[in-house]
Image (tube, grey):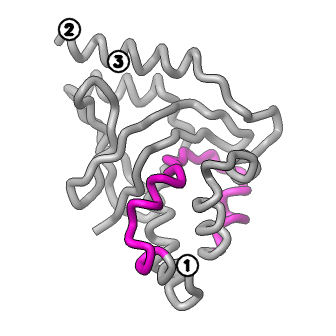
Amino acid sequence: MKKLVFILTTFALMATVLTTRAQKGQDIVDIAISVDDFSTLVTALKAADLVDALKGDGPFTVFAPVNSGFAKIDSNTLNALLEPANKGKLSAILTYHVVSGKLAASDVAAALKSGNGKAELTTLQGGKLTAVSKDGGIFLMDANGNYSKIAKTDVMASNGVIHIIEDVVMPK
């Protein structure tokens, strides 16, 4: 129990001290475009024709993988996903990273506390992600049992919030 309290406190502290490049009025897409480490994500959003959707009113919670997370995907597979013929499949993967509503780190921490270290999130794709307290951090577990660490939290946008993750999570 002490470890869970420590993890939740650390998570909340990370949210408090995080500095972001977000400026008042920037939406999720504007922020993603302004961060160099989201260039692959932005390319994928454009290829899946999701830019306008994520510029919408929301609110949305986006678990945004950094470039190094996309780099872990086989390059042939990633290139194929970016082709117009695979727009539907790419859209399904990207919307698996989005939850309806604005879930700040404190909301996730509260859900983890009430869920004994686990919290299930329903994505816009329709699948489930599970937030898990593990190894001194907070991770997302995808439908395949793979984990992605939440590296930074609470990048606030005018239409939601971005949490930065280290790996791409995949639906079944």
The CA distance from mark 2 to mark 3 is: 10 Å
Most extreme residue toward the left is 1
The residue wearing badge 2 is: 2
Instruction: Please count the marks in the image.
Output: 3
Rendered location of residue 164, percent (x, y) = 51, 41
When asked about the image quadrant of residue 73, the answer is bottom left
Give the foreground label among 1 and 2: 1
Residue at image coords 44%, 54%: 69
The residue wearing badge 3 is: 8
Q: Is residue 51 magenta?
A: yes
Please tell me which of labels 2 and 3 falls first in the chain. Answer: 2
The CA distance from mark 1 to mark 2 is: 45 Å
Instruction: Say what amino acid the circle numbered 1 marks.
Output: Leu
When asked about the image quadrant of residue 102, the answer is top right
Question: Dot 1 lies on which element?
Answer: loop
* Picture disc at residue 9: none
The residue wearing badge 1 is: 82
Instruction: Say what amino acid the circle numbered 3 marks.
Output: Leu
The CA distance from mark 3 to mark 1 is: 37 Å
Q: Residues within 10 Å of mark 1 (few under 14, many from 20)?
A: some
**Range of magenta residues:** 49-78
- Viewer-nearest residue: 88 or 37: 37
Most extreme residue toward the top is 2
Locate the C terminus by quadrant: bottom left
Residue 137 seen in render:
yes
